[in-house]
């Protein structure tokens, strides 16, 4: 979404922040260490698994993945599913795929599990990966078991339910929610296909014990991988505003009818709160006694701002644009693999 020409010219002239103040944030507090228990449980289930599907958010395709997955889960065949493609700006999709290929990830699919986009590609690709794996010994057992892993709230359960809709014409087998922590334990096997006979193991979201930077932590938090209150709703709203303005994505101005773009989060949240009627009475002590003053509810406005972004109502966003801009230009001699779609 874009501004009207006059407002856009004004926004283009504005001096948007070139950096976000990252000091003072305790990232370790955002990402609880108890998730290591989930990773150990996954490792104990590995002997049952023929292939691993890692699900990640397409808005952060190059950052925020848990580096311990590859180390802890061995050399099983691996498919990376970049979900929520409908919320991501994928104009530089080929650049994303080239970078992932340089990191050894040749089997990548972009999906939208809400509308089942590209879901039919998953099972054929998994079947091919397993068939080409020297570790797989078929014997008389003609069924496949796949483990679904990823950081919290990227759509692991939604992928399982989408596969069941596509291949079994059945409804939900796993709970789905808009906040992290819905899946609490490695579950029983869930059938997703009859031919081939395939079962998936849903697993709890597991974040890395150490996040590489505060900004990576903020990107993960914007995508809903941790509870908002751990970071601070207004801090997240400020980082979102900073990101949208830097990328010249001014859909929030139109959505909330603000008239013009602004880089001051207090001013934006105040206007959002007033537009939505999110106000609260506050008693103020004056020289003549207590006076009730109507004030904007900044926290409620921040929550609505984040919810609107996560619903895609502010338009598609690529939170890893800074990383993409720093990558080298394409090498025309390097071709993408058949699974890179």
Image: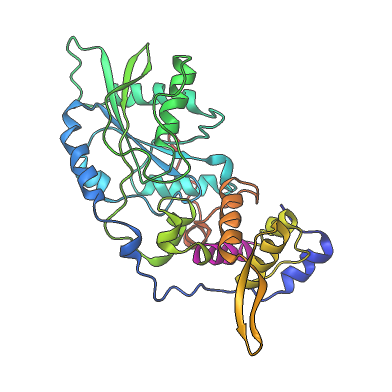
Magenta: main secondary structure equals helix
Residue 29 visible to the viewer: yes
Which color mode does the image show? rainbow
x%, y% of residue 247?
62, 61
Kindly give the residue lying farthest to the bottom in the view shown: 287
Above or below residue 29? Residue 316 is above
x%, y% of residue 340?
46, 36
Whether residue 332 is in magenta: the answer is: no
Displayed quadrant of residue 248: bottom right
From the viewer's perspective, is 136 left or right of 273? left
Depth order, front residue of 171/194:
171
Whether residue 239 is in magenta: the answer is: yes
From the viewer's perspective, is 216 left or right of 17? left
Depth order, front residue of 195/30:
30
x%, y% of residue 169?
48, 14
Residue displayed at 19% across by 32% down: 46
Kindly give the residue lying farthest to the top in the view shown: 140
Residue displayed at 70% across by 74% down: 14
Displayed quadrant of residue 338: top left
From the viewer's perspective, is 52 left or right of 245? left
x%, y% of residue 254?
75, 56
Displayed quadrant of residue 290: bottom right
Q: Which residues are magenta?
A: 235-247
């Amino acid at each position: 979404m874009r501004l009207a020409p006059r407002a856009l010219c004004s926004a283009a002239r504005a001096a948007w922040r070139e950096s976000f103040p990252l000091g003072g944030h305790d990232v370790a507090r955002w990402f609880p260490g108890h998730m290591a228990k989930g990773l150990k449980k996954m490792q104990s289930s590995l002997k049952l698994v023929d292939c691993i599907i890692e699900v990640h958010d397409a808005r952060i395709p190059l950052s925020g993945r848990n580096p311990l997955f590859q180390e802890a889960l061995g050399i099983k065949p691996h498919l990376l599913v970049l979900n929520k493609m409908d919320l991501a700006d994928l104009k530089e999709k080929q650049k994303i795929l080239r970078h992932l290929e340089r990191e050894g990830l040749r089997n990548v699919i972009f999906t939208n599990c809400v509308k089942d986009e590209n879901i039919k590609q998953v099972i054929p690709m998994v079947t091919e990966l397993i068939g080409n794996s020297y570790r797989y010994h078929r014997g008389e057992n003609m069924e496949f078991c796949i483990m679904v892993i990823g950081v919290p709230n990227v759509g692991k359960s939604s992928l399982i339910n989408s596969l069941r809709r596509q291949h079994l014409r059945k409804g939900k087998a796993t709970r789905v929610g808009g906040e992290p922590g819905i899946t609490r334990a490695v579950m029983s096997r869930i059938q997703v296909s009859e031919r081939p006979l395939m079962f998936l193991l849903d697993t709890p979201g597991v974040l890395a014990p150490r996040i590489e930077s505060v900004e990576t932590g903020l990107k993960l938090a914007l995508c809903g991988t941790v509870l908002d209150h751990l970071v601070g709703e207004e801090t997240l709203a400020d980082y979102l505003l900073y990101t949208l303005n830097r990328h010249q994505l001014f859909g929030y101005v139109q959505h909330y009818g603000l008239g013009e773009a602004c880089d001051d989060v207090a001013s934006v949240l105040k206007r959002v709160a007033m537009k939505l009627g999110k106000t609260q009475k506050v008693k103020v002590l004056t020289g003549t006694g207590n006076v009730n003053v109507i004030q904007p509810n900044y926290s409620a406005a921040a929550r609505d701002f984040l919810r609107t972004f996560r619903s895609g109502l502010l338009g598609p966003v690529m939170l890893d644009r800074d990383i993409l801009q720093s990558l080298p230009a394409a090498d025309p001699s390097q071709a993408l693999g058949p699974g890179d779609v």
